[in-house]
Amino acid sequence: MLDQLPVEIVERIVTKIPDTDLIAASKVDSMWWQEVRQEAYKRWKNYATIIGNIYWKIQAIGKQFEKGDIDWITFEDVNDSYKRWIDCLTENQLYIMEKMLKNGMVVDLQERETIEYALSEQRWG
């Protein structure tokens, strides 16, 4: 039944699937595989953008601290909070990247090498 849905419906469904279940949905048929692949790429890039924005915020808060606009306790609390958020987002991003790699969704050689490097870095801390 799932393999008979129109593309528009599949697109909507795929966007609602959590990261942990996303790749499993690609097993329905080739249309689902393509939609899941596109959604996984979107999420991968979105995580990268959010992580980059958080790094920018960390730098900004560091500059405020250096100027004396905020106290050390506030700086440490905010900095620690941002770093925990980055760790969580990075785990989610690496999870998607690994699943994409294992399921043949990464065709670009440079992207494949990027994922393999990131995963090896994660494994070795």
Image (tube, rainbow, N blue to C red):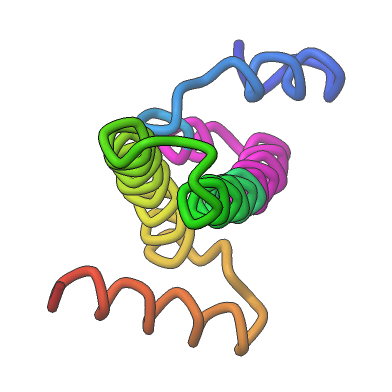
Residue 77 shown left or right of residue 116 in the figure:
left
Q: Residue at x 71, y 38 (%)?
A: 35
Q: Position of residue 10 (x, y in %)?
A: 73, 20
Is any atom of residue 37 visible in this view? no
Q: Residue at x 63, y 24 (%)?
A: 14
The magenta stretch spans residue 28: yes
In the figure, 63 relative to 24: above or below?
below
In the figure, 111 relative to 106: above or below?
below
The magenta stretch spans residue 17: no
Choose between 69 and 97: the one closer to the eye: 69
Q: Position of residue 25 (x, y in %)?
A: 49, 31
In the figure, 52 relative to 81: above or below?
below
Choose between 97 and 14: the one closer to the eye: 97
Choose between 69 and 77: the one closer to the eye: 69
Q: Position of residue 66 (x, y in %)?
A: 48, 57
Q: Quadrant of residue 115?
A: bottom left
Q: Which residues are magenta?
A: 23-46
Q: Position of residue 30 (x, y in %)?
A: 67, 44
Q: Residue at x 78, y 13 (%)?
A: 9
Q: Main secondary structure of the magenta part?
A: helix
Q: Residue at x 45, y 59 (%)?
A: 97
Is any atom of residue 116 visible in this view? yes
What quarter of the picture does the C terminus occupy? Answer: bottom left
What quarter of the picture does the N terminus occupy? Answer: top right
Choose between 7 and 41: the one closer to the eye: 41
Q: Quadrant of residue 3?
A: top right
